[in-house]
Amino acid sequence: MTASLGTATGNSAQPMPPIAPRSPIPGRRSYSTPLQAVRRRQEALERLAARPVMPPRRVEPIAVIASPRPEPRTLPVPLTTREVEVLRTWLLVDSKADVASRLNISVGTVNTHLARIRTKYADAGRAARTKASLVARAIQDGLVTLEEL
């Protein structure tokens, strides 16, 4: 009797499937040719291009939606009684000379008081460089009303 392949072990002779080389990348069964890699990339890009593009939604923070933040209340600048008097008088009359004569002080003293008032407002982050801005600050702080002006 002649021995045939696979009969010595008692198995019938069946062709064995070719063993594919293992890929160094996990999940892949075998190496691919550069052309196959290009095709796979192209197919992946086509799948991505076919997806609908959703514009990002604008999401407001929950805290803003739940409770609107109140306007920060500005604290009045700590002016002295004399500074308030000089400021109120200057806002109600036309010139610094009139302020000086009404309060029995010199024009230089009026200028000094106004410079200190402006410095205090600037230090508080509420600069008041002009007479109009000082009017606005005085109204905001309740030192003078629109009816008085």
Image (spheres, rainbow, N blue to C red):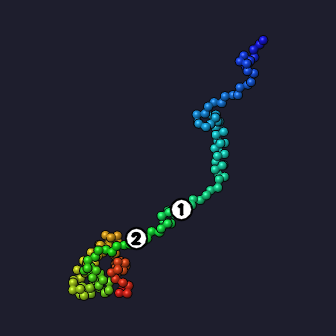
Q: Residue furthest right?
A: 1
Q: Is residue 132 visible?
A: no
Q: Quadrant of residue 79?
A: bottom left
* Relative to 40, 85 lies left or right: left
Residue at 57 percent of width and 61 percent of height: 57
Residue at 31 percent of width and 69 percent of height: 123
* Relative to 131, 4 lies left or right: right
Q: Position of residue 17 (x, y in %)?
A: 70, 28
Tag 1 residue: 59
Q: Amino acid at mark 2?
A: Pro
Of residue 133 and residue 97, the one placed in the foreground of this image is 133
- Looking at the rendering, in which quadrant would you find the N terminus? top right
Task: Name the mark on residue 137.
Answer: none
Of residue 104 and residue 12, the one placed in the foreground of this image is 12
- For the residue labelled by badge 2, is the local secondary structure a helix, a strand or a loop? loop
Q: Is residue 109 visible?
A: yes
- For the residue labelled by badge 1, is the local secondary structure a helix, a strand or a loop? loop
Within 10 angstroms of label 1, few (less than 14), some, or many (20 or more) residues?
few
Which of the marked residues, 1 or 2, is nearer the chain's N terminus? 1
Q: CA distance from mark 1 to mark 2?
A: 24 Å
Q: Position of residue 124 (x, y in %)?
A: 32, 70
Tag 2 residue: 72
